[in-house]
Every structure is written in C-alpha cells, then in structure tokens.
Amino acid sequence: MDSTSLQHGESQKPETQDIVKDAIRKEQVLQCVWPDLARGFESTKLSSPSHTGEITAAQDDLRALLTRVHSVQADVDKLTSENATLQVYIDNLTMQMAKRK
C-alpha cells in the first residue's frame, strides 16, 4: 500500500486483509495452546504436527506483518519529514509575503 492510498482514505489491499485475518486465526490457535506452554511442554498437543505447523505458519505471518509494519513506519517517517520541510517552506513564503505588504 503506497502513501497516496493512505492519504486518500482507500482501504487496505485484499491480500493485506487476508494476511491479517489469517494471523488472527493463528493467534487464536496459539492462545489455545498457551496453557500447554505454561505447563512446560508436558502436553502432547504441542507435539502434534498440525499444531507445530500452525505455530510455524503463525510465526511466519507475524514476521511478514512485522516487515510490513516497518515498511509503513518508514513511509510515515518520510511523509512526516516531507511535511516538516513543506511547513518551513510555507512559513518562509508567508514571512516574505508579510514583508512585501
């Protein structure tokens, strides 16, 4: 998602929404497994291949989301810097216009 789509209020791309929904679903699986983790891996639920696969997939999704968060944060930082530069420019123009009057 580029910065212009954020500025114009467009919604997230469908694949981004799917990633988020999938990550939420996998987080729910992790929450079901968490009590087993608290007992020190004594449960056989964790050794189940399906849970191990889901946990690995959830971790991958979280890594992808984290990468996206960093990318969006970099875009926000860039736009913030550009806005500050534009504000200085506007302030300078305003002062020049005030001096001419």
Image (spheres, rainbow, N blue to C red):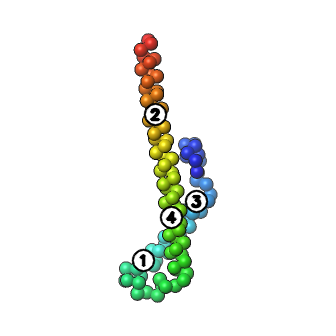
Does label 4 or label 1 sit earlier along the sequence? 1
The residues tagged by marks 4 and 1 sit, at their Cα atoms, a distance apart of: 19 Å
Please give the label number shown on residue 17: 3
Residue denoted by label 2: 85
**Which circle, 4 or 1, is nearer the viewer?**
4
Q: Position of residue 56 (x, y in %)?
A: 52, 74
Q: Is residue 9 in sight in this rendering?
A: no
Residue denoted by label 1: 34
Does label 1 or label 2 sit earlier along the sequence? 1
- Graded by Cα atoms within 10 Å as few (under 14), some (14 to 19) or many (20 or more), the crowding at tag 1 reads few
Q: Is residue 59 in sight in this rendering?
A: yes
Does label 2 or label 3 sit earlier along the sequence? 3
92 versus 99 height, above or below: below
Task: Please name the amino acid that badge 1 sits on.
Answer: Trp
The residues tagged by marks 3 and 1 sit, at their Cα atoms, a distance apart of: 25 Å
Q: Residue 41, located in which quarter of the rendered image?
A: bottom left
Helix, strand or loop for disc 4: helix
Left-right relation of 68 to 14:
left
Residue denoted by label 4: 63
The residues tagged by marks 2 and 3 sit, at their Cα atoms, a distance apart of: 33 Å
Helix, strand or loop for disc 2: helix
Q: What residue is at 52 percent from the left and 56 percent from the top?
A: 68
The residues tagged by marks 1 and 2 sit, at their Cα atoms, a distance apart of: 48 Å
Does label 2 or label 4 sit earlier along the sequence? 4
Q: Position of residue 23 (x, y in %)?
A: 53, 66
